[in-house]
Amino acid sequence: MRTNTIKIVFRGLIVAVAGYVGFVSAESAVYKAIPYAQAPVGEKRWAVVEDIVWDGVSYGNEFSASCPQPRYGLGASDEQSEDCLFLNVWTPDTAGKLPVMVWIHGGGFRAGSGNIPGELIAQEGVVVVSFNYRLGALGFISHPALDSKVANYGVLDMVSALRWVNRHIESLGGDPENVTIFGVSAGAMAVNLLMVNDDAQGLFHKAIAQSSYTTWPLWYTEDTYQNQRYWDGSPVKRAEDEASKLLAAVGLSEPSRQRLEGLDAQALVKAQQGFQIPIVDGTSIKAEPARLFMSETYQPKLDAYIVGANSYEGSVLPGTGISLSDFTSWMSNHLDQAKTVYAGDYNYKPDIAYQRLFGDLRYLTSASLTMKAMTDRGIPTYAYIHDQPLAKDEEYILGAPHGSETGVMLGMYFKTTGESGENMRRMWANFAKTGRPASGVWPTWVPSQRYWADLLVPNRNFASQIQSRVDLIESIYATRWSTP
């Protein structure tokens, strides 16, 4: 393992450090496509792959292939391969010891990659790391033919990437004792999963969860299923049943491990519908993370936490694979309350009210309950709501859609991404450096104040606009665990 810094050599726009060859981009050196774990191919397709010992030279001028996925976009490269466990590093000073920010991409655990403009964040004086992890059924599956207690290979890939950071980031100018993990949507859910993963403890020190859904029902293996329920009282899905349905769709009604390992990856990708759901397997995910956060025994190793959501998270509903009619059926006992709480939306269009309820239940509940859990344990916690609509819909009354704060942060398709993006990146970098995003402007959340910062105007408290929604969705969440 390489841990010592080798002499830095500048060759025009090329920077070579510790066997990694990078290229200068926007006042930072970027090292792309660094392998961090063995290729999960062949017999290792569904295996816990080992961390890689890299003895060669990594020429990092191009992103690696993305992991197999639907061609949604979401930053994925055109090239796809199961040999996809690579990471990227942007560093403004290879001789420094700067705070490290590790980005975990979203995409419903089915799509996305580490292909981001990391130099925008690195300009704020931090080292930025992004990486790929296994997606869809290639990353999350439980089936008897695999004979494995592990179901979340994608989560264990994340742990491997964090171990690489811990061992090697000092060679590229980062401080392994000051690591912040941050992500959006599935990436934020991953942040929360890592916060309760035993193997990840000590590998990061602060966390930012942008639109996580840690309170959403997960799938369960046969070994972990204990009559867990959805809100309408129906049983949650069993991972083995979902795997069998997927394999039947690709013509494998009686699969063996050998046949599974020889299956065309794109066939699995094309057969899968909706988002991938992480699996409670008793090992890589021991229970739904929100339940662990709220348990008396949970003691997080975390210095500070940021959590938040967008004002119109319900925009994500069409991509989830859940129909609005199914959702309203689940919520049949709560629709009268929703009509009151979301009266403005309901009077405009009833479907919009129910769609906003869906988004709040999936994302705002997670933000609210995890925020309270961290605060109860003495961890400085900052909450936000992002309310900036899409630029093309300047008068759009519904608010900021799901994941849109990431577009601001990364300078994508938003009218005010210039100054707003710079401000957000600066706050996130300040948090990585000091544990405070905006000192004197954005206070921590405490029960007596309930401060939800308006993300792009953090001295404005958004709490009064969402408190009735928070009260409703928290009461709905509680019914999942009181249903006999």
Image: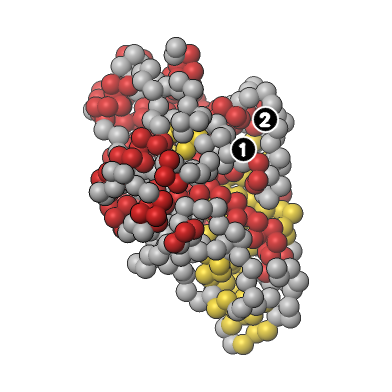
Amino acid type, label 2: Tyr
Residue 484 image-quadrant placement = top left
Residue 8 image-quadrant placement = bottom right
- Count all numbered tags in the image, as a single digit: 2
Residue topped by disc 2? 298
Does 60 sit above or below residue 366? below
Does 276 sit above or below residue 462? below
Tell me if I can see residue 89 in this picture. yes
Q: Residues within 10 Å of mark 1 (few under 14, many from 20)?
A: many
Q: Do the CB atoms of the residues marked 2 and 1 lie less than 8 Å apart? A: yes
Residue 449 x, y percent position in the rendering: 62, 25
Decide which of 133, 376 is in the foreground and name it.
Answer: 133
Determine whether, in the image, residue 106 is placed left or right of residue 58. left
Residue 226 x, y percent position in the rendering: 49, 22
Decide which of 369, 43 is in the foreground and name it.
Answer: 43
Tell me if I can see residue 214 in this picture. no
Name the residue: 49% across, 58% down: 44
Secondary-structure class at tag 1: loop
Determine whether, in the image, residue 136 is placed left or right of residue 327. right
Name the image quarter holding the N terminus: bottom right
Name the residue: 49% across, 55% down: 133
Residue topped by disc 1? 196
Residue 444 x, y percent position in the rendering: 65, 34
Query: Residue furthest toward the top?
Result: 484
Name the residue: 69% across, 26% down: 297
Amino acid type, label 1: Val
Determine whether, in the image, residue 482 is placed left or right of residue 415. right
